[in-house]
Amino acid sequence: MQTVVERELEMQLMLSPERSIPVPAKLAYRTDDPFAVHVTFHVGSDAPVNWTFARELIVEGVFRPCGHGDVRIWPTKVNGRSVLCMALSSPDGEALLEAPSSPVASWLERTLRVVPPGTEHEQLGMDDGLSRLLAPVAGDELWLGNPSPGQGRPDDTPDASA
């Protein structure tokens, strides 16, 4: 059964050090994609802008600067209030967003209770899938046993150059 942890909040899209505009956003975490977080930005266009990145980035970014490349996250204070900065970069452009730290941290704590760090792989069911894939089935002994007399293996084929 899939569990979804969501939180809607308002982020600030920083246009300059003195100017920003509010951007409604939704943070989402799904147990069927346990290593990732999904952020949907509603920027006033017909289609929202979606970003997906490692949950570990936010876990670390709440405490210290982290990330390289397309997603960078760090905590800071702005006018005495704690915010989480998120720098996003793509071929289409770059954006710097600020989110209030408290709602992001409480949402993140909920995701960590649902799937504790280090247990993400258990959500994927890979062990069960591999067991089923590798389980012997009737007829396997024919493939795994010795070939019948007169049937050689490819490496038993005489070398034409000999």
Image: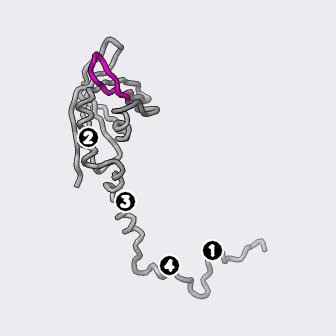
Question: In terms of secondary structure, what is the magenta stretch mainly?
Answer: strand
Q: Does the CB distance between marks 1 and 2 fall below 8 Å? A: no
Q: Which residues are magenta?
A: 74-86
Q: Which of the 4 image quarters holds residue 64?
A: top left
Query: Looking at the image, which residue is at 34% across and 23% down?
Result: 76
Query: In the rendered image, which residue does mark 1 sit on?
Result: 154
Percent of width and height locating residue 43: 27, 25
Quadrant in the rendering for residue 41? top left
Q: What's the residue at 29%, 51% (across, down)?
A: 32
Q: Nearer the viewer, mark 3 or mark 1?
A: 3
Mark 1 and mark 2 lie on one chain; the one further toward the N terminus is: 2
Element at badge 3?
Answer: helix
Measuring 36% from the left and 54% from the top, which residue is drawn there? Answer: 121
Identify residue for label 4: 143
In percent of width and height, residue 21 lies at 27, 18
Q: Which residue is mark 3?
A: 126
Identify the image quadrant of the C terminus: bottom right
Q: In the image, residue 11 lies at what x, y percent? A: 26, 25
Disc 3 marks a residue whose amino acid type is Met
Q: Between tags 1 and 4, which lies in front?
A: 4
Q: Nearer the viewer, residue 92 or 103?
A: 103
Q: CA distance from mark 3 to mark 1?
A: 34 Å
Q: CA distance from mark 1 to mark 2?
A: 57 Å
Is 76 covered by the magenta stretch? yes
Marks 3 and 4 sit apart, C-alpha to C-alpha, by 26 Å
Q: Residues within 10 Å of mark 1 (few under 14, many from 20)?
A: few
Q: Quadrant of residue 136?
A: bottom left
Q: Position of residue 56 (x, y in %)?
A: 37, 41
State how far apart marks 3 and 2 are (Cα).
25 Å
> Which of the two residues, 134 or 120, is positioned nearer the viewer here?
120
Residue indicated by mark 2: 109
Label 1 – label 4 distance at C-alpha: 14 Å
